[in-house]
Amino acid sequence: MKVLVPVKRVVDYNVKVRVKADNSGVDIANVKMSMNPFCEIAVEEAVRLKEKGAATEIIAVSAGVAQCQETLRNAMAIGADRGILIETDVELQPLAVAKLLKAVVDREQPQLVILGKQAIDDDANQTGQMLAALLGWGQATFASKVEIEGNTAKVTCEVDGGLETISVKLPAIITTDLRLNEPRYATLPNIMKAKKKQLDTLKPADLGVDVTPRLTTLKVEEPPKRKGGVKVADVAALIDKLKNEAKVI
Ligand code: AMP
């Protein structure tokens, strides 16, 4: 079974993002970029499926600027067999990414695509679902456990007050939640090996996809600054403030 794992290059989760002075977006100049954490979980899950004998080949694919190569090398250091970069400087929105991924699926014919449930930059949580719709495949989103049984995937997802387990016929789309696994660290020998793995580069036009953005960002603003707190003398003063100032009780 071939597994395709789309990985996105995003601002590292430790970076405190800043809004550009002209409010046109977030400043990503000279900011540390890394693989989206949910995509790391997706790569790890694919590697575990390969280790269990359920997967035979793992292909990592990333769409974006040339530096996404680093993200792909990282995926290959974790255990992906090869990488595909769809190179473009155009700002990609989820529908464009889903169309690009559909074209890659048509070429590579994987039985399973494992994506992150969301990218931590735009928090869209759309690409996996859109890809499932474009392909007409079943989808199991927010996976916290994945088991492959013959021609089906048994996928568990955390829901309010419990766990829901569904069965999807392959080929299918799975998106990963945080507790699915803990991704391994890439070891130095594996980082070195990853440098020699195959990495093909395509352009959106090679896949016949128009990636022109459909949405325009009007304005990006910082959240309002939190006002300082006050210490109240006793419970009576607290109740008084909640009642008469905050008007919440
Ligand atoms: P989103 O729908 O943008 O929140 O992203 C969900 C998932 O879609 C990510 O975790 C990735 O697996 C995949 N994805 C989104 N954008 C890209 C991209 N530019 N290149 C590769 N995969 C992507």
Image: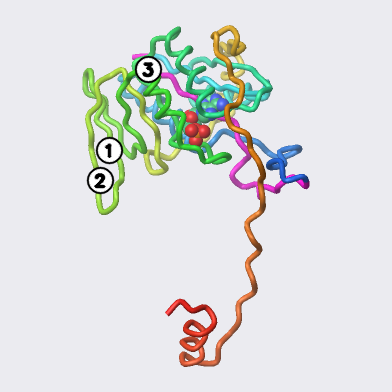
Q: Amino acid at mark 3?
A: Leu
* Circle 1: element type: strand
Q: Mark 3 packing: few (<14 Cα in 10 Å), some, or many (20+)? A: some
Question: Residue drawn 56% across and 29% down?
Answer: 93
Asked if the stretch drawn in magenta spans residue 160, the answer is: no
Please tell me which residue is depicted at 65% across the width and 36% down the height of the picture: 33
Percent of width and height locating residue 226: 63, 67
The magenta segment is 1-21
Along the line of sight, which residue is nearer the eye, 75 or 66?
Answer: 66
Instruction: Name the kind of residue labelled 1 in the image.
Output: Thr
Callout 2 crowding tier (Cα within 10 Å): few <14, some 14–19, many ≥20: few
Closer to the chain start, of discs 1 and 3, is: 3
Pick whichever of labels 3 and 2 is earlier in the sequence.
Answer: 3
Q: Specify the quadrant that holds the C terminus.
A: bottom left
Residues under labels 3 and 2: Cα distance? 27 Å
Q: Is residue 216 left or right of residue 171?
A: right
Displayed quadrant of residue 210: top right
- The residue located at (55%, 88%) in the rendering is 232
Question: From the image, which quarter does the N terminus lie in?
Answer: top left
Q: Position of residue 13 (x, y in %)?
A: 59, 44
Cβ at disc 2 under 8 Å from ligand 1: no
Q: Quadrant of residue 197?
A: top right
Mark 3 lies on residue: 135
The reply to whether dot 1 and dot 2 touch (C-beta < 8 Å) is yes
Q: CA distance from mark 1 to mark 2?
A: 7 Å
